Amino acid sequence: NLNIDASAARADAALIAVEAGTAPNYRVAMHGVTVRGPGPKARLDGIVMAPGTFADAIDLVGSRFSDMAGAVVLGTGEQAPKGWYPVERLTIADSHFARVGMAADLLRKGSDESTFGPWFAMTGSQVEDSGQDGASLRLSGVQHADITGSGFIRSAPIAVIHSVGHPDTRIAKNRFIATPEPRIEELAYNGPIRAKLSDNIVVARPWPAPSPWCSPPAL
């Protein structure tokens, strides 16, 4: 197990910054890692991927992240509208997030359909007192997403934005306590929402909670 105490950080930083020029098809695995950040006084992201980099897999397993004003996994650097994305498979399992900006923020942008990812899975995890820009977990352009058996407590909602391709999104058997239901948005498709939501439990008062971590989305 590894414990990282970054509570004294005073400047914006990242635990792992994957820089441009990094050889493709790398992997990042955080198993049994505990990270404590500086809270809202400085932005701390977890794994940040520069444009032009590509990971085969990023795994967060049995880990705990707290007091991080940024995203634990930040994959929004690829802004070119070419269907590129920073990681093929992002897996979160049996992990806990408290007072973080987002558990993950993942983006695939553009209308190119020649690629088939990314894939995202979250199981047996908990997010509490978290949220930034209207979401505690944001998946934009993700082609395969499976969020099951997890809990979201006093947090901003899950935000899923479908763009091109044939996205397969399943959100099932989760608990949303003082947290709104997942928000699904279709950018190009004109039919019914393409997401399977089943056996989720939504209880207690809705977000936003009176917390510096959970600011409501701009109107």
Image: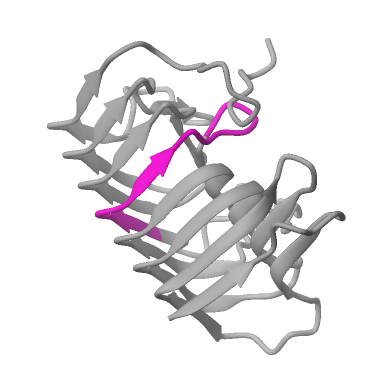
Residue 203 picture location, percent across and down: 24, 18
State the residue in front, 13 or 169.
Answer: 13
Of the 4 image quadrants, the one containing the N terminus is: bottom left
Could you say which quadrant of the image residue 197 lies in? top left
> Is 123 within the magenta?
yes
Asked if residue 43 can be seen in this view, the reply is yes
Query: Which residue is pictured at 69% across the width and 16% down the height?
Result: 218
Say above or below: 139 vs 95.
Answer: above
State the residue in front, 206 or 219.
Answer: 206
> Is 147 within the magenta?
no
Residue 98 picture location, percent across and down: 48, 45
Residue 101 picture location, percent across and down: 61, 41
Looking at the image, the residue that sits furthest to the right is 11
Residue 126 picture location, percent across and down: 34, 46
Query: Which residue is pictured at 75% across the width and 52% down the height?
Result: 79
State the residue in front, 159 or 203.
Answer: 203
Q: Tell me the magenta residue range.
A: 120-135
Say above or below: 109 vs 200.
Answer: below
Q: How is the image coloured?
A: one colour
Looking at the image, the residue that sits furthest to the left is 199
| 203 relative to 216 in the view: left or right | left
Query: Which residue is pictured at 62% across the width and 33% down the height?
Result: 132
Query: Which residue is pictured at 29% across the width and 35% down the height?
Result: 195
* Number of callouts: 0
Asked if residue 83 can be seen in this view, the reply is no
State the residue in front, 196 or 110.
Answer: 196
Of the 4 image quadrants, the one containing the C terminus is: top right
